[in-house]
Structure formats: structure tokens, C-alpha cells
Image: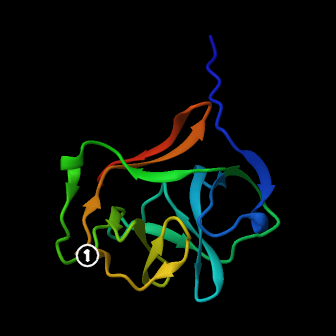
């Protein structure tokens, strides 16, 4: 018996995705789930299903090949996964790979190849000056896509 996993989305060139969009693409170690982000006027990708070796941060990938076809996850949403009690208050420092919640939006931090830390609004994909260390955060979160009156969970993040 074979199981076919159907992920709602469509193949599209990466350069047609706007910041804040999620996509799946072939990676060196299997599929990469990424959020298109923009920082200093440059489009980058925040890898949602990977952790960097140093500190467990989400990696930021620059120099994207815009002619690459990816699976666009239309309507993807990042949301806390678990009970309300799982959301912790800010502790003065950004928690690696936590989903930070505040002012009607949610934020993720990533670290680029040069070690710089950046915070991104997950809805707009735009780099933010907000300090995530002061915000409540969820260590467990997931990426969901609406489909047929329900949702499909694409990815579940757990604490490192």
C-alpha cells in the first residue's frame, strides 16, 4: 500500500512569489520549506525547516536563483502549535527558532551566513526593527495551508 501526500500548492518561478509567501523547493538534504523575506531591499529566504549549526537559529539564504521553480503554498499561515499555556512571556533575549507574537503580527528571527541576526514579520516578509526578546513567544509552531474547509499542516516546529 502506498500513501500519497498531497500538498496544496502550485509550481511557480521563485521570482513571482512576494515576500511573506511560503514555498517548498528541492534542497541539498531534502525539501526546504522557506518564507520569502526582504531585507535591505534584497529578496532572501528564511528556511523554516532547518536550523543552523551555531545556536539553532533559522538560516537566511541570500543569492536566490530566481529562475528556480518552487511549490508555492498559497495561503500558508504560521501559527502557534499547542495550548495557550505553551506561549511564554518575553525573557529579554530572542529565542532561536521561536515564533514571536505581538502587535497583531508574528515574527521569526534568522541568522545569515555572516552571523547577523534579523527579525522578519511572517505576514509581510519584511525585516523588522522590533526586538523579539520582549515579545511572548511559542517554541512549538506550525505552517498550515487552508484546504477544503479545513487546514493541512505542512510543518511542525519543536524546540531544539
Give how far across and how far down residue 62 sits, in percent: 62, 77
Q: What's the residue at 61%, 50% (across, down)? A: 75
Q: Residue furthest bottom?
A: 40
In this figure, which colouring scheme has been used for the structure? rainbow
Question: Which of the 4 quarters of the picture holds residue 111?
Answer: bottom left
Residue 39 versus residue 58: which sits nearer the camera? 39
- Image coordinates of residue 13 in percent, x first then y, are 80, 60
**78 and 112: which one is in front?**
78
Where does the C terminus fall, quadrant-wise?
bottom left
- Number of numbered discs on residues: 1
SS at mark 1 in the image: helix
Q: Is residue 56 left or right of residue 33?
A: left
Residue carrying label 1? 133
Q: Residue at x 34, y 45 (%)?
A: 81
Front residue of 111 and 14: 14
Classed neighbour count for the residue bearing mark 1: other residues with Cα under 10 Å, few (<14), some (14–19), many (≥20): some
The quarter of the picture where residue 51 lies is bottom left
Q: Position of residue 159 (x, y in %)?
A: 29, 53
Residue drawn at (79%, 61%) of the image = 68
Amino acid at each position: 500500500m502506498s500513501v500519497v501526500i498531497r500538498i496544496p500548492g502550485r509550481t511557480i518561478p521563485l521570482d513571482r512569489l512576494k515576500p511573506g509567501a511560503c514555498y517548498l523547493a528541492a534542497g541539498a538534504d531534502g525539501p526546504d520549506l522557506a518564507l520569502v523575506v526582504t531585507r535591505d531591499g534584497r529578496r532572501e529566504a528564511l528556511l523554516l525547516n532547518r536550523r543552523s549549526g551555531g545556536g539553532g537559529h533559522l538560516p537566511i539564504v541570500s543569492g536566490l536563483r530566481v529562475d528556480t521553480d518552487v511549490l508555492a503554498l498559497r495561503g500558508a499561515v504560521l501559527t502557534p502549535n499547542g495550548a495557550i499555556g505553551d506561549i511564554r512571556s518575553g525573557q529579554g533575549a530572542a529565542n532561536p527558532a521561536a515564533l514571536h507574537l505581538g502587535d497583531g503580527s508574528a515574527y521569526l528571527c534568522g541568522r545569515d551566513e555572516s552571523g547577523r541576526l534579523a527579525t522578519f514579520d511572517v505576514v509581510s516578509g519584511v525585516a523588522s526593527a522590533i526586538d523579539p526578546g520582549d515579545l511572548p513567544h511559542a517554541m512549538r509552531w506550525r505552517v498550515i495551508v487552508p484546504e477544503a474547509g479545513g487546514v493541512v499542516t505542512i510543518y511542525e516546529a519543536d524546540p531544539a
